[in-house]
Image (cartoon, helix red, strand yellow):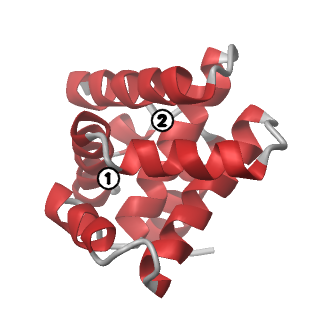
Amino acid sequence: MNDLFGNTKLAAYFLWEYTGCENAFDLWLCAEDMACLFEQSGLIEPCGVEGIVSSGMYGLEYIEFVRTISYRIFQYTNRDDEWQNWFAAERLLNNGEWVDALTRISAIYRYEKNNQEVMNEVRSENVRAFYDEQTFGA
């Protein structure tokens, strides 16, 4: 659980650094939500994210992935400037520490989704609900 906490804290820190959002709880929820997205996409190793980034900024996979990250930034920071959100998403995806933290969280989600004690450490109700549904059915 310390690994989950530490990596979520690091991911939220970089979200704060790149967005300037002052709401630490929302940044924490954003990091958890992005890690859930990574896990759903099978991105539990940094090389998976690096593959998307290296595919090029004009590739459809890259565009869709950055769009999804920037939308989550908008959702949790309430920052309406889509270009700022897009550039923040690109900076995050090119930050090895952030990618490593997010993929570690996503790996924990994948391998511990049946461990209720670990899932209770997740603050995002949406993320917990997703894994409850995946584990126990709707």
Q: Secondary structure at mark 2?
A: loop
Residue at x 29% of width, y 29% of height = 7
Place residue 43 in its image quadrant. Answer: bottom left
- Left or right, 108 with reference to 29: left
Q: Nearer the viewer, residue 91 or 35?
A: 91
Above or below for 43 versus 120: below
| Residue of label 2 | 122
The residue lying furthest to the bottom in this view is: 60
Query: The C terminus lies in which quarter of the figure?
Result: bottom right
Above or below for 56 versus 50: below
Distance from the alpha carbon under mark 1 to that under mark 2: 12 Å
| Residue 128 appearing in the image | no
User: What amino acid type should be assigned to the residue bearing mark 2?
Assistant: Val
Residue 75 numbered mark, or none: none
The disc, 1 or 2, on the residue closer to the chain's N-terminal end is 1
Residues marked 1 and 2 touching at CB (< 8 Å): no
Residue at x 27% of width, y 38% of height = 101
- Left or right, 77 with reference to 78: left
- Left or right, 22 with reference to 53: right
Residue 65 position within the rendered picture, expressed as x and y whole percent measured from the top left: 49, 69
Place residue 110 in its image quadrant. Answer: bottom left
Residue 2 position within the rendered picture, expressed as x and y whole percent measured from the top left: 23, 21
| Residue of label 1 | 106
The crowd level at tag 2 (other Cα within 10 Å; few <14, some 14-19, many 20+) is many
| Residue 55 appearing in the image | yes
Place residue 21 in its image quadrant. Answer: top right
Residue 94 position within the rendered picture, expressed as x and y whole percent measured from the top left: 32, 48
Above or below for 5 versus 122: above
Q: Nearer the viewer, residue 57 or 75?
A: 57
Q: Nearer the viewer, residue 53 or 11?
A: 53
Q: Secondary structure at mark 1?
A: helix
